[in-house]
Amino acid sequence: MPSIRQDLAGDSENFFEKHCADLGVTVRGTYDLTGLRADADLMVWWHAESSDHLQKAYADFRRSALGRHLAPVWSNMALHRPAEFNRSHLPAFLTEEPRGYVSVYPFVRSYDWYLLPDEERRDLLREHGQMARDYPDVRANTVPAFALGDYEWILAFEAEELHRIVDLMRELRASRARLHVREEVPFYTGRRRTITDIINDLP
């Protein structure tokens, strides 16, 4: 087994570091989900200028030495677009270094959200943002996913300490904007680790 793991680790490191770069794909992180969910142990977060490049990387990974041992349980794509009320805003993954932990989840707005007057929606989002002001260390990524899957948005919160994500999520439960959320599961949360370390800890 040690030699098999060694081979898998070497092949996977080469895949994520070299092959993905050759495809124009940036790997933001490989994350250890062990014990946080029963259906997943590994999550990969990658991004690129083109969705075609991501699909190619995903297909190649499925055919890799490690990928052939894995079964996908959840896969989603989102596409950065200018924010509705702050068009200069960029998600953290485009401008900042990754943090030690991430929590990724989808959400779908209520049917009437998009029919509310712009000023009302702006006010609700402003309140939501103000409630997060005590958590500047938790970096947000809110990316549109309309028509790319079953969800409208994909979110990823990053922080160096897991409890900061937990505390922020609890705080935001009291925002009025949450009354306009129809769906916000599943959650995939884990620690950013090298693919070698993750492989070495797999059963």
Image (cartoon, helix red, strand yellow):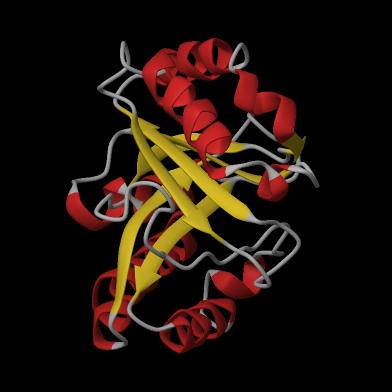
Q: How many numbered dots are placed on residues in this image?
A: 0
- 166 or 60: which is nearer to us? 166
In this rendering, would 50 be left or right of 169? left
In the rendering, at what x and y percent does residue 77 appear?
56, 67
In the rendering, at what x and y percent does residue 101 appear?
39, 32
Which residue is at a point 28% across and 46% down the rendered structure image?
Answer: 92
Can residue 92 be spotted in the picture?
Answer: yes
Can residue 200 be spotted in the picture?
Answer: no
In this rendering, would 80 be left or right of 24? right
In the rendering, at what x and y percent does residue 116 appear?
67, 42
| Quarter location, residue 15 | bottom left
In this rendering, would 176 be left or right of 81? right
Which residue is at a point 71% across and 67% down the rendered structure image?
Answer: 149
- 13 or 181: which is nearer to us? 181
Q: Is residue 9 above or below residue 154?
A: below
Which residue is at a point 56% across and 84% down the rendered structure image?
Answer: 59
- 53 or 87: which is nearer to us? 87
Q: Is residue 42 above or below residue 189?
A: below
Quadrant including the C terminus: top right
- 67 or 112: which is nearer to us? 112
Which residue is at a point 53% across and 77% down the rendered structure image?
Answer: 58
Q: Is residue 135 above or below residue 67?
A: above
| Quarter location, residue 159 | top left
